[in-house]
Amino acid sequence: MLGIIGGSGLYNLEGFRIREERTLKTPFGEP
């Protein structure tokens, strides 16, 4: 399994598709 965490620039990469999108909350605030 591979996870990629990135910003808004990853939404339009050719050849990639979003399989699952998660919203995370951490003790340090939202990413």
Image: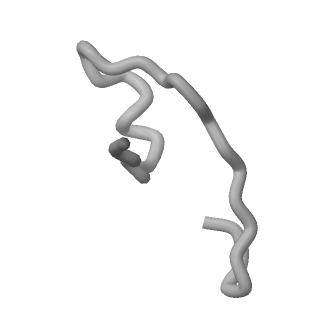
Q: Is residue 21 left or right of residue 10?
A: right
User: 20 or 31: which is nearer to us?
Assistant: 20
For the point 44% across and 48% down, the residue is 7
Q: Give the tally of numbered discs.
A: 0
Could you tell me residue 14's position as x and y percent? 25, 15
Farthest residue toward the bottom? 28
Quarter that holds the N terminus: top left
Farthest residue toward the top? 15
For the point 70% across and 76% down, the residue is 26
For the point 42% across and 52% down, the residue is 5
Farthest residue toward the left? 14
- Applied colour scheme: one colour
Quarter that holds the C terminus: bottom right
Whether residue 27 is situated above or below residue 1 in the rendered picture: below
User: 1 or 15: which is nearer to us?
Assistant: 1
Could you tell me residue 20's position as x and y percent? 59, 30
Q: Is residue 20 left or right of residue 13?
A: right
Whether residue 21 is situated above or below residue 24 in the rendered picture: above
